[in-house]
Image (tube, helix red, strand yellow):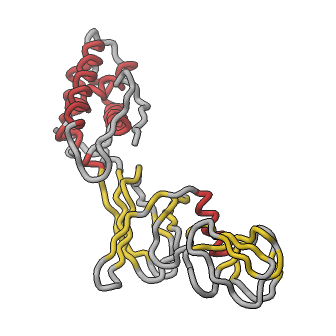
Amino acid sequence: MNLLQIKQTVRALAGRSEELAPMLSFFITSAQATLESKFIIPAMEKTSSGTLAANTNVIPVPADYSSLIYLQIVDANNGTPNARMLKKASELELAQWELLKGLSFTWTLSTAVSLGDVIIPTAGTTTYGFKVTTAGTTGATEPTWPTTLGGTVVNGGVTFTAINKYETSFPSRFVRFGSNFVTSETATSAYTYNVRYYAPITALANDTDTNWWSTNKSELLIYGTLLNAIPYVDNPKMNEWMMQYERLMKEFRTALGREKFSGDRQQFSTSQSDIGCNMNVYR
């Protein structure tokens, strides 16, 4: 069904076509938004691809982004593509990465360091930064750095402890920061990124428009619209509309429970009632 056909059906069922006409498009859009707050469906999956340039660690969040399925980085520079799904990290970890990259300094001989300073080796491992856990003056030669997280080494009068993974090549983790995803490591060469995410389905705007809901679940859209219109109509069949809507929702939930698609298993709200308009999707 297109938008005009849905409007006509709602008017016929409500029996108040004149009063409802000015607000029908709004009610239909609201009904769709309610459905998308209850269910995540395959039609909502999208992919955004681009290039993470060398010496950068920022990937833009798609404009229609709703929630993430996965973030992937692909390195095609070594002959064979090397793909990695980035793991989600915390903003605290982002702050730690920035500390290591922006506020730390490299090891130098015979230098006084303070408790809590972070040192980056000039030789050996580049996997970790090293926090000063006993203050003092560094030795005359650079130590052999530990290769495990939490490992310690004494250098001159200083004890260093390995902290916070510090890779300088292929990104492994990310955080959402404003309108960007920020990776834990700055790219050393150009990488392709793929953001697989959920986005709202384009709402119906013109009378000839169709979308996934109007084509596949027009009854749900119609009865959802009628429920939105209840405050503006006085129809003896209002209870029947509610029952029909709940029946259709249960059938849809059962059908989606059998489906699997890329990303996470289909999720839906667990509210006792399907009529409420502000439902959460749990992932």
Asked whether, in this view, residue 174 is left or right of residue 16, the answer is right
* 151 up-or-down from 277: above or below: below
- Front residue (pair 52, 124): 124
Q: Quadrant of residue 119?
A: bottom right
In the picture, measured across the screen, residue 47 lies left or right of residue 217, that is right
Q: Quadrant of residue 178?
A: bottom right
- Residue 89: percent from left, percent from top: 52, 58
Image quadrant occupied by the N terminus: top left
From the top left corner, tell me how far across and down residue 90 is, in percent.
Answer: 56, 56
Tell which of 157 and 227 is nearer to you.
157
Q: Is residue 102 visible?
A: yes
Q: Is residue 189 above or below residue 3?
A: below
Quarter of the picture containing the C terminus is top left
Q: Up-down: is 24 above or below 259?
A: above
Q: What is the quadrant of residue 102 in the picture? A: bottom right
Which residue is painted at 38% across and 37% down in the image?
37
Q: Is residue 124 above or below residue 200?
A: below
- Residue 44 in the image: state x and y as whole percent: 30, 49
Q: Position of residue 11 (x, y in %)?
A: 24, 25
